[in-house]
Image (spheres, rainbow, N blue to C red):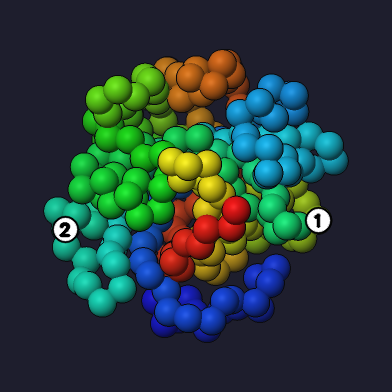
Amino acid sequence: MNAVLQEVAHRPWPLPAGPWAMAQSWHDLLFAHWPVDARRLRALIPDRLEIDSFDGQPWLAVVPFRMSGVRLRGTPAVPWLSVFPELNVRTYVRYGGKPGVWFFSLDASNSLAVAIARAWFHLPYFRARMSCAEREGWIQYQSERTHRGALAGSLKGRYRPVGETFFPRRGTLEYFLTERYLLYTADGSGHIIRGEIHHPPWPLRCAAAEFDLNTMANSLNLALELPSLLHFAKRQDVLVLRPERLA
């Protein structure tokens, strides 16, 4: 991860001072994006956050991948805790002029990781029964939420990269959707929490995907049919800094 810290010129603002809190690597990641109605999205986001849009259009993403090397600073990565699939549903927001990601849900197959993330980062993590494996050039992915008391959410399908690797340029839609270095959430009292992350620029490829089942946004009363944009990343190494309460 020391090499990750040496690559900072691409960031939209300087990397904050202080040690990172968590390290992780993301593998075989799919960004599946849909345009969404701004008025419907506004009702789902805290008023203190501004909906971020590209040319006036907000977006929502379903992001399946698998993680490895998940560890807190000063601790080793261990197989039974550090390797598991994850599935996110997210949109894009701003606070104080700084763009970031708002997560509607984060599903993971590791119960301990879910408990730590919910308690420390105040993120809406949920336990799920999940599988992620490569077969004949496709990533076969399946997830079914099992978290007690949580609304249902399932994804079943497959995806693969197509085309050459590229790095999104500033000002493009691909850059807007992927090059984000803040996450926003809210605690139980409604206070906004912000967390900085750091990673190298995204090495993207266009992607193909086939979904047999996708109910990940049903709890938001948003029906997702065929995605408008698909991008794939083979690997991304990520550092997470300590979250801070804003308001």
161 on left or right of 58:
left
Residue 185, horizontal then vertical, whole percent? 52, 46
Q: Nearer the viewer, residue 203 or 42?
A: 42
Question: Looking at the image, do the residues carrying marks 1 and 2 touch, with CB atoms under 8 Å apart?
Answer: no
**50 with respect to 75 (left or right):** right
- For image coordinates 69% across by 30% down, the residue present is 42
Residue at 46% x, 25% y is: 216
Residue 94 x %, y %: 70, 50
Disc 2: CA contacts within 10 A as few (<14), some (14-19) or many (>=20): few
Above or below: residue 141 compared with residue 15? above
Residue 183 drawn at (x, y percent): 55, 53
Q: Residue at x 20, y 71 (%)?
A: 76
Position of 223 relative to 227 (above/below): above
List x then y, in percent, for residue 80.
14, 53
Pointer 1 or 2: first along the chain: 2
Quarter that holds the N terminus: bottom left
Res. 135 visible in picture: no
In the figure, residue 221 lies in which quadrant?
A: top right
Three-letter amino acid code at disc 2?
Answer: Pro
What residue do we see at 34% from left, 24% from top? 150
Question: Could you tell me which secondary element the residue under label 1 belongs to?
Answer: loop
Q: Is residue 216 above or below residue 243?
A: above
Within 10 Å of disc 1 (Cα), the crowding (few <14, some 14-19, many 20+) is few
Write down the residue under mark 1.
Answer: 171
Q: Is disc 2 placed on a helix, strand or loop?
A: helix
The amino acid type of the residue labelled 1 equals: Gly
Name the residue tied to disc 2: 79
- Nearest the eye: 158 or 126: 126
Residue 14, which numbered label?
none
Q: Residue furthest right?
A: 55
Question: Residue 156 vs residue 131: left or right?
Answer: right
Cα distance between the residues tagged 1 and 2: 39 Å
